[in-house]
Image: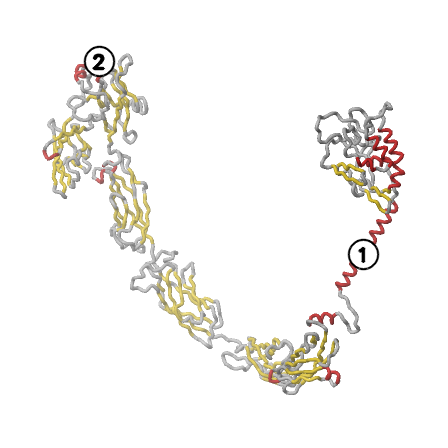
């Protein structure tokens, strides 16, 4: 089965009468094909009528030309009308000329236009269908033009099955456009297989349709497989290209190079991609201001670039472009859209700041500081309040002493000249400065011959002030000998009037005189000694005594200076020995070094002469001096004096004969080091008494207090023990007979043995402060037994099959304090009671002989590792009871009871 077209058609059927078909016939002429285009009898201008495959004739044509001016052929082979055309009953044709300039190839394509009549809507006879035995049930491509004008229903094609020769075949279709959205767009005649479209289709909404055709007999038999029927919607240039933005805003810097990129615009087109309908071309329609032309646009990418380097923001800071985009590769019949592009010109520092005046003048009073004396202004054409406009001022010359500073006012961009260091009119009456200015941003035209800095001259006139006196130099000195007579006068401090350079009219007074040694003359500033001057006095450094002087003029202006009195030395101090106590360890040393000093200057000092200043013959016999150098001697003993402190007077005389006697304390000790001797000597007084330090006394007092506390504790403990009587409890006998219901030894059972007697201590309750449970101590031939009674009870109730604990028959808890008993007390107290207890334990309630003190436990199986825990239980063997043979006679009755006879 196959799809069949109407008779007379040799190519694919178009989707309507106004749709075009193209039939290609192979011609032998120039190896090109003849093209036949079926068109309506009436064609509008700029109407697409078909497409010719140019590459089959010339692969790369460089020139395409139509022989008929009513038709235009594009690069992709699309044929458009340039004018409205009405076809005559005869056919119309034209020739497409193709040429390739590289290989000089030229070809022609003959195009024939035929008037296509409407396809008759008639049913094909069955006989005619049966004669087409070579057709098959296979898909045949089909297409229709979007936005077709009709008439509708529009015939598309016919589908047939070869099985119709043998069966009555019914045709049907399914898929999008039939039983799916958009519904009822296509239908097929059941008997003929003719396929129709019912209304126009928008390709931008539906690019194609995939239908499925079915062939079946009236009884439902399907002799053919389903047939896919693809229907492609041919695009029509019905969509305008649209810019992505209505207004584009770009920025480009002034003075940029030719070809600098400004920005890129972009447009979209909803028509079929990769066709002339979506081949866009960009262009600039208008530039405002119009002249000169500064921008160009790439036709295919939409990139805007500069075509001139004469962009100057200071002249024009904004341009506006009207741009256009057109499809059909910019052909005049293509659809087009416009948009606006605003280009801002960015500022660069291409204008230097310049001073408004070449020179400036200012004045300032002397001795003033931190004052503004001048403001200078500059002009700059660059953008205001940007680094290209803001100014930086500097002082180039004339400020070597650092008296001035210039800064920038951030609000007005002016230069502010200030005085930061006072000027002196007497030294400088006028200062000439050279100032310069640059921008914060570097100058962009550094390579130009023009200087990058503007300069100006500033003349500063210094105005005179009525100044006070000047204390120059601030430190003045005068020389006076020490110990001069009181009332001696000398030159003092001198201040000057800076204008007259004289001291007349200046008055003086002391501000500071630490020791009150001098007075100052009010008019002349001279000084007079008020008290004796001492060069060696405390606080005098390097022999200079400083006083502070205040000088004032008649108007009250003052200045302060310092007068240093250099005290010339006189020999008024004899040399002396500063170390008054020395130690000689007799066992290790025989002498000691003595050093003398002189407060006077060296001219009045050493070399010194040392001698013993005592006339006592004993001192002369015992001590001897030997010179070491000009300021030191060696003192040594002789004739083996005893260990003792000695006083040795030594006279020291300077070079001018002034001497002084120093009484030297010499400790002659039996020691190894001087510290040892010093410690021993420190503990002795003149009468040989011993003195204790405060810490030694405190330690003795603490020892006495501790001893008193110990004695008091012992006395109190003895008195309390004497007052407590010895009390023996009634159930004392039970304290050595403990019966346990535990059938195996536990971890808390400790066994002690003393004198062959065993005592069981259960848990921690059997331990007390009296010592180890069951321990015995024999002292002085008498045995002492110590017992501890915990919280234990003796249950006297006896019943068969019950377990008993060692409680008292009264069921009371008996507690016992720490006690210690002798053997005689134990014997006299326990003998009668123990016999009674043994007798009772040996009988039952019916006066029958009891088998055991503790009732027999129920049988628990053979091989028990614990065995019976009753001390008097029946045993197969009596191993481990040998200790009963060594008990005292009073305990034998108890032992006999515990063994069953």
* Mark 2 burial class by Cα count in 10 Å: few <14, some 14-19, many 20+: few
* Residue pictured at 78% horizontal, 42% vertical: 772
Outermost residue to the top: 219
Picture coordinates of residue 464, whole percent (x, y)? 47, 75
Which residue has dot 1 on it? 707
Q: Single out the mark in the foreground, 2 or 1.
A: 1
Which residue of the protein is positioned furthest toward the bottom in this rendering?
Answer: 657
Display colour scheme: secondary structure
Instruction: Say few, some or many: other residues with alpha carbon within 10 Å of mark 1 (under 14 / 14 to 19 / 20 or more).
Output: few
769, 252: nearer the viewer = 769
Q: Quadrant of residue 66?
A: top left
The residues bearing labels 2 and 1 have C-alpha atoms spaced at a distance of: 144 Å
Q: Position of residue 421 (x, y in %)?
A: 47, 70
Q: Is residue 895 visible?
A: yes
Along the line of sight, the residue nearer the viewer: 399 or 97: 97
Determine the secondary structure under disc 1.
helix
Residue 389 appears left or right of 85: right
Q: Earlier in the sequence, mark 2 or mark 1?
A: 2
Q: Secondary structure at mark 2?
A: loop
| Residue drawn at the location 63% of the way across and 76% of the way down | 539
In the displayed structure, would residue 269 be above or below residue 470? above
Tell me where residue 649 sits by quadrant: bottom right
* Residue drawn at (28%, 26%) of the image: 209
Q: From the viewer's perspective, is 542 left or right of 67?
A: right
Quarter that holds the N terminus:
top left
Q: Nearer the viewer, residue 890 or 608?
A: 890
Q: Which residue is mark 2?
A: 166
Would you identify the image quadrant in which residue 616 lies?
A: bottom right
Q: Quadrant of the C terminus?
A: top right
In the image, 316 versus 642, the foreground residue is: 642
Q: Position of residue 817 (x, y in %)?
A: 83, 41
Identified at 27% across, 38% down, the residue is 241
């Amino acid at each position: 089965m196959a799809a069949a077209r109407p008779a007379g058609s040799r190519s694919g059927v178009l989707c309507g009468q106004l749709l075009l078909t193209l039939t290609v016939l192979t011609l032998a002429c120039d190896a090109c094909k003849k093209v036949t285009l079926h068109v309506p009898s009436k064609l509008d201008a700029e109407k697409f009528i078909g497409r010719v495959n140019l590459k089959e004739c010339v692969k790369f044509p460089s020139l395409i030309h139509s022989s008929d001016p009513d038709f235009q052929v594009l690069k992709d082979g699309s044929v458009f009308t340039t004018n409205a055309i009405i076809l005559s009953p005869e056919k119309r044709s034209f020739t497409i000329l193709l040429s390739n300039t590289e290989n000089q190839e030229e070809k022609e394509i003959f195009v024939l236009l035929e008037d296509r009549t409407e396809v008759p809507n008639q049913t094909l006879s069955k006989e005619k269908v049966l004669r087409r035995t070579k057709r098959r049930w296979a898909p045949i491509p089909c297409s229709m033009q979007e936005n077709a004008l009709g008439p509708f229903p529009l015939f598309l094609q016919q589908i047939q099955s070869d099985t119709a020769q043998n069966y009555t075949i019914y045709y049907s279709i399914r898929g999008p456009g039939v039983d799916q959205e958009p519904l009822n767009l296509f239908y097929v005649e059941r008997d003929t297989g003719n396929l129709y479209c019912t209304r126009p289709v928008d390709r931008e909404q539906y690019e194609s349709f995939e239908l499925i055709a079915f062939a079946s007999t009236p009884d439902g038999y399907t002799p053919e497989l389903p047939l896919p029927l693809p229907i492609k919607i041919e695009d029509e240039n019905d969509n305008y290209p649209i810019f992505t933005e209505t207004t584009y805003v770009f920025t480009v810097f002034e003075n940029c190079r030719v070809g600098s990129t400004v920005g890129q615009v972009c447009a979209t087109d909803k028509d079929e991609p990769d066709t002339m309908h979506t081949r866009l071309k960009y262009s600039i329609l208008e530039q405002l201001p119009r002249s000169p032309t500064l921008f160009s646009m790439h036709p295919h990418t939409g990139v805007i670039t500069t075509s001139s380097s004469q962009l100057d923001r200071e002249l024009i800071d904004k341009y506006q472009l009207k741009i256009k985009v057109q499809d059909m590769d910019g052909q005049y019949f293509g659809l087009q859209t416009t948009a606006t592009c605003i280009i801002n010109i960015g500022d660069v520092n291409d204008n230097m700041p310049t001073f408004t005046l070449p020179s400036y003048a200012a004045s300032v009073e002397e001795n003033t500081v931190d004052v503004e004396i001048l403001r200078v202004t500059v002009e700059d054409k660059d953008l205001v309040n940007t680094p290209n406009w803001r100014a930086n001022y500097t002082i180039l010359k004339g400020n070597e002493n650092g008296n001035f500073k210039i800064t920038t006012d951030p609000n007005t961009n002016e230069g502010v000249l200030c005085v930061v260091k006072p000027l002196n009119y007497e030294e400088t009456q006028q200062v000439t400065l050279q100032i310069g200015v640059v921008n914060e941003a570097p100058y962009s035209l550094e390579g130009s011959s023009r200087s990058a800095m503007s300069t100006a001259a500033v003349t500063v006139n210094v105005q005179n002030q009525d100044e006070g006196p000047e204390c120059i130099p601030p430190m003045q000195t005068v020389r006076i000998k020490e110990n001069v007579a009181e009332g001696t006068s000398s030159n003092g401090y001198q201040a000057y009037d800076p204008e007259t350079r004289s001291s007349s009219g200046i008055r003086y007074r002391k501000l500071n005189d630490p020791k009150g040694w001098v007075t100052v003359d009010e008019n002349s500033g001279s000084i007079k000694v008020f008290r004796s001057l001492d060069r060696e006095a405390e606080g005098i450094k390097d022999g200079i005594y400083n006083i502070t002087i205040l000088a004032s003029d008649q108007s009250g202006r003052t200045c302060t200076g310092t007068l240093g009195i250099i005290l010339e030395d006189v020999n008024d101090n004899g040399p002396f020995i500063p170390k008054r106590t020395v130690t000689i360890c007799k066992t290790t040393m025989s002498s000691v070094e003595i050093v003398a000093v002189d407060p006077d200057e060296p001219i009045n000092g050493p070399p010194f002469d040392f001698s013993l200043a005592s006339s006592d013959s004993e001192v002369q016999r015992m001590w001897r001096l030997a010179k070491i150098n000009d300021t030191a001697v060696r003192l040594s003993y002789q004739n083996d004096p005893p260990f003792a402190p000695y006083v040795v007077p030594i006279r020291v005389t300077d070079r001018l004969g002034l001497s002084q006697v120093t009484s030297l304390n010499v400790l002659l000790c039996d020691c190894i080091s001087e510290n040892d001797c010093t410690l021993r000597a420190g503990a002795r007084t003149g009468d040989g008494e011993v003195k204790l330090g405060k810490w030694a006394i405190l330690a003795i007092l603490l020892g006495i207090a501790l001893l008193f506390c110990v004695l008091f504790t012992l006395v109190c403990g003895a008195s309390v023990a004497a007052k407590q009587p010895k009390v023996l409890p009634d159930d004392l006998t039970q304290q050595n007979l403990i019966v346990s219901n535990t059938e195996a030894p536990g971890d808390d059972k400790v066994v002690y043995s003393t004198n062959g007697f065993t005592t069981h201590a259960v848990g921690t309750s059997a331990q007390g402060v009296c010592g180890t449970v069951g321990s015995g101590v024999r002292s002085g031939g008498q045995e002492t037994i110590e017992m501890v009674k915990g919280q234990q009870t003796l249950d006297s109730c006896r019943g068969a099959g019950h377990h008993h604990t060692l409680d008292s028959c009264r069921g009371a808890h008996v507690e016992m304090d720490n006690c210690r008993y002798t053997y005689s007390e134990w014997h006299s107290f326990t003998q009668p009671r123990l016999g009674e207890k043994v007798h009772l334990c040996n009988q039952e309630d019916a006066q029958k002989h009891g088998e055991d003190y503790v009732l027999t436990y129920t049988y628990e199986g053979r091989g028990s590792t614990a065995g019976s825990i009753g001390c008097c239980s029946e045993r197969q063997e009596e191993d481990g009871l040998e200790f009963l043979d060594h008990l005292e006679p009073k305990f034998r009755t108890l032992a006999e009871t515990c063994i069953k006879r």
